[in-house]
Amino acid sequence: MAPPSWLSTLVWTEYRLAVVFFVVVPLILLVWTFIQRFPALERLLIIYWRVSSLLAITVYLMMAALPVSFLTAFGVLILIPLSLWYWVDINEELADRSGWLAGVANVWRWAATLLAGLGALIQIPFLGCAFKSTGALLETAQCRVWLEPPWGFKALFHANIPIRTLGFWGLVALVVYGFCLAYFLLVRLGRQGRAALNP
């Protein structure tokens, strides 16, 4: 059974917006920041890229139709706004800074936060997909539709790589990400506070 056409359109639209606001715009901002030498925004973007790397991991997990990918997809949409707004000192520096770079950065933070929030709300009804077997996941149209954009990505960039290989490396990356996030939250942030921002 095919998913409703509106759901397929919604999923593809969300993926396209995610590419623009979670990948392209912050990449442009990162290059712009290095050129303009804006340390506060540089630190913020480094934190953002570390957190949002879970998006790439999720894509590879979805290529292999691994159910855990639905949890990581939801989790990263919660973590992204936190990574953009948690740091009070950086917020103050951005508020005090004039010019195009700071202005564009703040507009992007609000846009990314709004997109992440809406995306998380949209995905709540589909969290049940995370608790299905891979076989059941593939047989459920409302779950399978979320896998179509990652499969399209695979066809473009990894056509000759077995799905199991991509899924394996996605799981390895997820374990590494989990350890790094736990270390940051429990050790560096707990002991150093905002000094943990320093690379």
Image (cartoon, grey):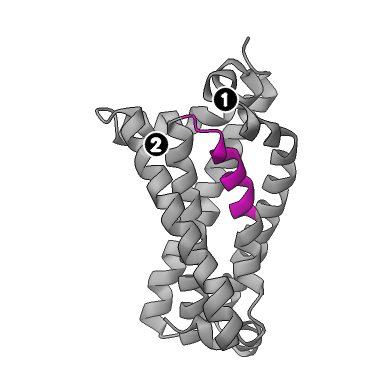
**Picture residue at 59% right of the left edge, 54% below the top:** 76
Q: Classify mark 1: helix, strand or loop.
A: loop
Please name whichever residue, 159 or 112, is drawn nearer the observer in this view of the structure.
159
Q: Is residue 198 above or below residue 67?
A: below
Q: Which residue is mark 2?
A: 167
Q: CA distance from mark 2 to mark 1?
A: 15 Å
**Picture residue at 54% right of the left edge, 66% below the top:** 182
Q: Which residues are magenta?
A: 65-77
Q: Position of residue 97 (x, y in %)?
A: 59, 88
Q: Position of residue 59 (x, y in %)?
A: 46, 41
Q: Position of residue 21 (x, y in %)?
A: 54, 55
Q: Is residue 62 above or below residue 85?
A: above
Please name whichever residue, 172 or 62, is drawn nearer the observer in this view of the structure.
172
The amino acid marked with disc number 1 is Ser
Q: Judge whether residue 114 can be spotted in this image.
A: yes
Residue 133's label in the rendered image is 1
Q: Nearer the viewer, mark 2 or mark 1?
A: 1
Q: Main secondary structure of the magenta part?
A: helix
The amino acid marked with disc number 2 is Gly
